[in-house]
Image: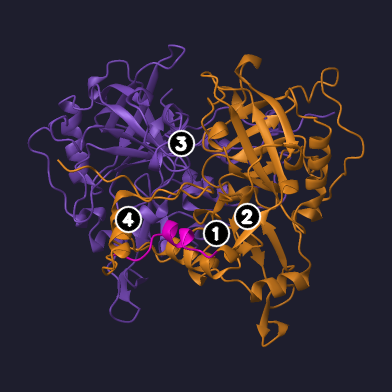
Chain colours: A orange, B purple
């Protein structure tokens, strides 16, 4: 009996360097000078991207969470990339302060809800007597910061989008979805369209406000909050470990994404209480430390495939239209969250 | 400091009976005869659905997988609902034969790839000398069975859809997405539209073939296969444990969904080899048995919320437009895979 071929795929966020068996054969054929039997898979497009299409991630923009070792004593490190300006900078500033104060050290992962989120912070936050005090000087961030770009930035960003239209317009949660400066976003163009270089409003009044906002894909990191108008400080964080809960977009702040080690959160036992909270303190996973990348001596350097590059446009198109050997029928489109931005360690 | 309210959510597939704290207060206000401070959450709509809106699931349509106990000795049972006619019946028939022959007993979960799939079957399938022989009489299923409905069934199904239009038409992977007989599906109407009771073709030739096909949402169970035209026998199965890999729709057979115990698969350690295969046999999770529900004496009875019911339509609308207290801004739409069909144990 022949082997059942495993489902071809990218490892999310981190780019797998190992192609599935069928594609490895195809690459060998190309190397031997024979005609390619099949178009490139998304992973092959990424592997072939020129160095200039990759953007370094500064250590200052990384958050490194060290969990207690697992049951077998293996280390568990989760690396998070914080969002760049103009996105979510109020909360990102708070998170930098919390990390610099070593505020999370000794706290824990308190909630893991299947197909939803893993959440960490102070398990005693609601009991004043037991709660850990927050550092002074944290910003109270207004809801307007759920949107980061000015209207003119929105217009000019839309003009430069390289994402295939098959990705942009069939999104149940945003008029347009695409990638901006390395991040998946929803876009509302405010009813303006470009005629040459001049934006003109083409929809009836009252038009929606032009806006760009980050979206809840797998691995994205967000800020737990109380009821509106509270927006959270950034002390209570979660990451998405299931199908993208896009209904949270524009309702909760997103501040970053896990770029390495998400399996240390996604494979944790699910909490058995309501919403996936653990029943006992013993079930929680202790956080040894959370540090800004600049404080971590042995941190590798990382880079992401620029979402404004030609390689990314080809990669997104290949994700929307799989033509490699395993596939019979290309989809003709892709969900924004099915096009994870490739991130890798710098070689 | 006030407690940071956990993110309100449904537990996927299995309906959580515990509303988030804020909603519990709202329910108390309703019970006390005061005005409701907030519209019903999706979970509250489901809880209020009349008995007649629930459809029993026959034990004959269930597959019960018992994994070896976990490290603490706790039992691990995964319950899978098989698809009804006319969907995927060639593979479903094979799976019934494999289960009746106790074919999977002593095999294992061999692959867990983060944000993608957990896969089980014969780890030695590719080595003839070691591979377990398949039972005789398994069907060789043609690719045409990726689609189950006749064109006339497609037309009349479209006429009776109750899913809100905000869900139906903004799908990157299908012209229309909705629910049919309890399952999430993609639909191509073949360019026909109804004028009264008569379907008329309104698009230019050549029109696409009218078709309905099941889609790869979280928890769906599919059939591993070799390269086309192979479609797999059903002996090698996987379930989705991450963001819906919808590019697999119409490329691989789907045969069912996990309705209970998916956390026993989704929280397994990720394999460290290519595609999430385990490096050593010791890392695999042994399968004690897989049985049809009719062979399992202590199996609870289950039911799902009929996707043709009024309660389901309200639930889907509430998933697309969250108006409960936590939310500031309803999305105005929803991804088909963000509307898990509620399934519960019969009380």
Residue stretch in magenta: A38-50
Inter-mark Cα distance, 3 to 2: 21 Å
Label 4: which secondary element: helix
Task: Kindly identify which chain the residue marked by label 3 belongs to.
Answer: B
Read off the residue under disc 3.
B13
Which percent across, then down, holds residue B266? 45, 33
Q: Are marks 2 and 1 in contact (CB under 8 Å)?
A: yes
Circle nearer the N terminus (1, 4): 4
| Quadrant location of the C terminus of chain B in the rendered image | top left
Q: Residue A124, relative to residue B82: is it above or below? A: above
The one of A28 and B308 positioned closer to us in this rendering: A28
Q: Are marks 4 and 3 in contact (CB under 8 Å)?
A: no
Which percent across, then down, holds residue B257? 36, 38
Label 1: which secondary element: loop
Inter-mark Cα distance, 2 to 1: 8 Å
Please name which of the two marks, 2 or 4, marks the residue nearer to the observer.
4
Read off the residue under disc 2.
B331
User: Do dots 2 and 4 share one subunit?
Assistant: no
User: Do dots 3 and 2 share one subunit?
Assistant: yes
Read off the residue under disc 1.
A172
| Quadrant location of the N terminus of chain B in the rendered image | top right
């Amino acid at each position: 009996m022949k082997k059942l071929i495993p489902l071809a795929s990218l490892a999310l966020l981190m780019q797998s360097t190992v192609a599935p068996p069928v594609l490895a054969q195809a690459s060998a054929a190309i190397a031997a000078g024979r005609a390619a039997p099949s178009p490139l898979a998304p992973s092959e497009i990424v592997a072939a991207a020129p160095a200039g299409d990759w953007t370094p991630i500064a250590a200052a923009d990384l958050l490194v969470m060290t969990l207690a070792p697992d049951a077998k004593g293996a280390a568990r490190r989760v690396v998070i990339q914080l969002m760049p300006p103009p996105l979510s900078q109020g909360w990102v500033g708070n998170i930098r302060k919390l990390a610099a104060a070593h505020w999370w050290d000794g706290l824990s992962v308190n909630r893991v809800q299947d197909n939803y989120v893993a959440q960490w912070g102070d398990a005693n936050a609601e009991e004043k007597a037991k709660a850990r005090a927050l550092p002074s000087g944290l910003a109270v961030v207004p809801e307007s910061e759920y949107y980061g770009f000015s209207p003119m930035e929105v217009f000019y960003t839309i003009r430069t989008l390289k994402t295939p239209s098959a990705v942009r317009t069939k999104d149940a949660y945003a008029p347009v979805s695409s990638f901006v400066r390395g991040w998946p976003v929803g876009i509302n163009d405010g009813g303006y369209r470009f005629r040459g270089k001049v934006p003109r409003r083409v929809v009836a009044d009252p038009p929606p406000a032009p806006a760009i906002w980050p979206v809840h894909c797998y691995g994205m990191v967000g800020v737990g909050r109380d009821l509106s108008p509270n927006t959270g400080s950034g002390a209570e964080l979660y990451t998405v470990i299931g199908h993208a809960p896009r209904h949270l977009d524009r309702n909760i702040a997103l501040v970053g994404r896990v770029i390495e080690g998400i399996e240390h959160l996604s494979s944790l036992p699910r909490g058995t209480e309501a919403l996936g909270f653990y029943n006992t303190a013993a079930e929680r996973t202790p956080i040894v430390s959370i540090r800004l990348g600049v404080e971590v001596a042995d941190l590798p350097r990382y880079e992401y495939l620029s979402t404004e590059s030609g390689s990314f446009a080809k990669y997104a198109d290949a994700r929307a239209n799989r033509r490699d050997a395993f596939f019979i029928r290309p989809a003709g489109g892709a969900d924004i969250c099915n096009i994870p931005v490739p991130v890798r360690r710098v070689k």
